[in-house]
Amino acid sequence: MDTIWTRGVSPTEYPALVGDTQTDVLVIGGGMAGILIARELSSRGVLCAVVEAGRIGMGVTSGTTAVVSAQHSTPYSRLLDDLGRDRAKAYLDANLEAVEEIARTAQGVDCDFERRPSVIYSTRDKEKLIREAETVKSLGFPAYFSRDFPANTGAVGAVIFPDMAQFHPLKYLYGMASGLTIYENSVVRRVKDMTAYTDGGSVRAKTIVIASHFPFLDRRGLYFMKMHQTRESVVAVEGGPEIGYTAVEDEEKGFFLRGYGKLLLVGCGNHLPGEENDDFARIGLFLEKFAPGSRQVCRWVNQDCVTLDGVPYIGRYSPALPHIFSLKAKKHRTNPVRCFFLRQSSSFPMKYGSCFCHQHQSWFTSKPQ
Ligand SMILES: Cc1cc2nc3c(=O)[nH]c(=O)nc-3n(C[C@H](O)[C@H](O)[C@H](O)COP(=O)(O)OP(=O)(O)OC[C@H]3O[C@@H](n4cnc5c(N)ncnc54)[C@H](O)[C@@H]3O)c2cc1C
């Protein structure tokens, strides 16, 4: 994928897997999820290896907008209503922990990490946002409602989370990958008896984490029946306003925006692969108002997973595979909750790392089948 992130870095050159080897934990997939779980485990002294089909970070992670926030759409009022205060708070705390963990680990990595307030805005439903801001505040985080913000978007109001962040996803990922055992250009073709087979060799492990974005072991878990992909388009322009926040419109096909140096990134979408769409035309119209006179420097289309029940598929892959774990968050289309993995991918591996250490996962709600 040609994006502003891939243009700014040199590709990695880890060796391919050749021959047979063993490790304690094998992570399949070297995107943000896989690299962060491997980093986390490694920092706990666990022997682990990552096997990546192509080059690390070149999957969905290379086309993200890389906003690091505990705010994704307006989930907290819904979680409070559906799951109660304790779980809503546990979920918020896990997300806030994720932001701080990324902030902590980004120190010392040249990854353009910057603190930014994150904003969810609406062009029509002020009341919903007021309630969300009050809910989050009651759960202990100083979110607040702001009227008519952001300017030039038609917003009637916004929920603002202070002190969130943004970064360069590949620079950060490469920093996190440093020192790990990684095999690139090694597609895992099958997994049998706790051994993963590639064309060049095999890795035997005591535990396997599937972080391949879309779980690829079909005979167990039946994930292909429980998730699908949605696509979104992003345009990077120069000559637009330099915004000091990141923002997402609280709509099914709403806009999202962030700055990066002198660039402004604007995206929208949320449609099925192959479905006709007018994303780029919509972004063009948006930019006429928001960034008149700006010039496009890059554009791309990317996709992410959507789960059936709106909860992350994280945990044991299937009762029949007790030592294989799946690590894939949700992004729900029809439910107001849209969880972005990158935002969670710090907290999920952290929590998931704890899972290996037998700690309690208070906010896990999904059950493997
Ligand atoms: C347009 C867009 C904008 C987004 N913006 C944000 C944002 O601002 N903030 C945010 O938090 N999230 C955002 N997201 C979501 C976030 O970027 C993704 O959820 C996250 O990057 C996914 O990481 P991943 O590691 O699961 O997947 P990937 O990055 O796709 O990594 C999976 C890896 O597994 C490898 N793989 C697959 N099969 C095999 C196999 N058989 N053997 C070996 N390797 C295999 C692939 O090659 C790939 O490298 C956005 C998503 C989109 C689409």
Image (spheres, rainbow, N blue to C red):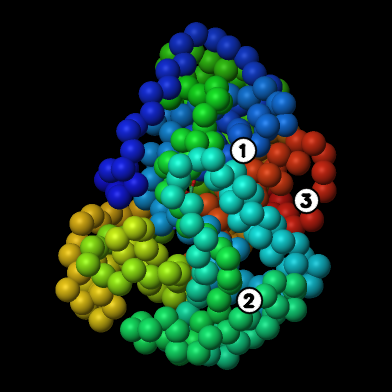
User: Quick check: 356 above or below 242?
Assistant: above
Task: Give the secondary structure at mark 3.
Answer: loop
Q: Secondary structure at mark 2?
A: loop
State whether label 3 is within 8 Å of ligand 1: no
Q: Residue at x 38, y 70 (%)?
A: 243
Residue receiving disc 1: 37
Seen at 41% across and 53% down, the residue is: 64
* Element type where label 1 sits in the image: helix
Residue 53 sits in which quadrant? top left
Marks 3 & 2, CB-CB < 8 Å contact: no
Say which of 165 and 110 sits in front: 110
In the picture, the disc for residue 361 is 3
Q: Left or right of 141: which side holds 184?
A: left
Q: Which mark is residue 143?
A: 2
How would you rate the neighbour count of disc 2 (Cα within 10 Å): few for under 14, some for 14-19, many for 20 or more?
many
Place of residue 364 in the rendered image (x, y in percent of width and height, measured from the top left):
73, 54
Q: Amino acid at mark 1?
A: Ile
**Taking 60 as reference, is 20 above or below it?**
above
**Hey, what amino acid is under mark 3?**
Gln
